Image (tube, rainbow, N blue to C red):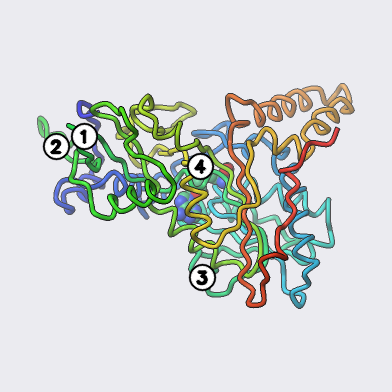
Amino acid sequence: MNGSFANCPEWLAELIVNSGGSVSFHQYMDWALNHSEYGSYSSGSLKLGTKGDFVTSPSLGPDFAALLARQVVDWLEQLQQENFNNLPLSLIEIGPGEGDLAFDLIQELEQISPEITKRLELILVDINQGMIKRQKERLSNICKVPIRWLSLDELAENPVIGVILAHEMLDALPVERIILRNNMLFRLGVKLEAINSHSLLSFDELPISSSLLDSLLELENEVGIKIPPDGASDGWSSELHIDMNQWLDKVSKTLIYGSLLIIDYALEATRYYNNSRQSGTMMSYKNQYASSDLLKDPGFCDLTSHLCLETLLYYAQKNKWLLLGHTRQGLALLALGLAERLNSLQKLSSEQLDIALSRRESLLRLVDPAGLGEFRWLAFEVNNQEDYIKSNIGLKTRFLTEPDN
Ligand SMILES: C[S@@+](CC[C@H](N)C(=O)[O-])C[C@H]1O[C@@H](n2cnc3c(N)ncnc32)[C@H](O)[C@@H]1O
């Protein structure tokens, strides 16, 4: 890890110099993705989809949203039954990327339940202007439901009743990286070096901060996750999602009552913080190419890491989220009717053979156990009503049931 150097763009060199020549990996990742002018999401340089830098399930076509819509309608109908003085129902997406999921979901919801759609508003939350601009373009033709773009803080000031989706958003949260050196833990940083009058980036090993140590201790004492694991060798490194606790806290305050569905890459702690996983899970993506070179082309690549399942569950319950359940995407989509959808492709006419084949391929990709099918779907609910009685809650969650035969 110490040996790699990468060219540093001028904007980043200036920021690092102004910060004393070295910054935490967390700060580096935040700038590389979210810096207001140069970050890969905020500048809009990163594109999602088969013709972009990387694909996500919704960017493969509308089938993913069509299946997910069944779950969203189920939850919204349950919320509607609670009446809430005819307050609108909200569908909130955090981190909507190109806006594909929101766009396709709204079309499908209109088909499945025009009644719910009449009472629905769409709220999109993104921190990056470059993405918001593209979402506005993508969604400009939707006129059946009102759309608002809000920050989590704005939403928390006027909480709503509804369903929140966070699809491949948490994996973009900046992480702290730690490294084991001579039996001591260090905080990984990124520093600037001038070599032959070139500004180069390389990794740095900084003293561990007290807040990081506190997080590690909390995870060990409360969840039993030992980081580093016993037997980890010199140079072992991994990531910590230190912003996840605060994110779950903020999100829980945006709902009066409703559910949160997180869909993302996640690993059990024993697989994540394992001594055979020498350098964590972080990857960089650009032009459909995955690389472990995390310092290359900052501001033009995606940087992403898996979530730790138990850490997420722990922070969720700490912030009033009640777990409804979790499963892998393959099983979730089967429970929502993927097999029938695959079968229905046979009904397409022979002129539509190309469409049928490409949809078939996308559907199979969504459940491929070696790819997107391995994603985790985690459902939670929160109830902030004053008269809320704990024993009376529990939104029924269709994707956790056995698939229909
Ligand atoms: C990997 S893309 C996911 C896009 C989309 N959900 C999909 O699956 O196609 C991550 C998205 O999350 C946004 N994002 C990153 N950090 C965020 C945060 N803290 N709050 C809200 N959005 C965020 C990015 O700007 C981008 O739109």
**Considering depth in this image, is 242 or 61 the residue closer to the camera?**
242
Rendered residue at 51%/47% (across/down) = 169
Name the residue carrying label 1: 202
Give the residue type that dot 2 points to: Glu
Locate residue 49: give its quadrant.
Answer: top right
Name the residue carrying label 4: 309
**Considering depth in this image, is 143 or 179 the residue closer to the camera?**
179
**Considering depth in this image, is 204 or 225 the residue closer to the camera?**
225
> Separation of disc 2 and disc 1 at Cα?
7 Å
> Separation of disc 4 and disc 2 at Cα?
37 Å
Name the residue carrying label 2: 193
Mark 3 vs 1, N-terminal side: 3
Q: Nearer the viewer, mark 1 or mark 4?
A: 4
> Separation of disc 4 and disc 3 at Cα?
28 Å
Question: Dot 3 lies on which element?
Answer: helix
Rendered residue at 32%/45% (across/down) = 176
**Considering depth in this image, is 336 or 366 the residue closer to the camera?**
336
Mark 1 vs 4, N-terminal side: 1
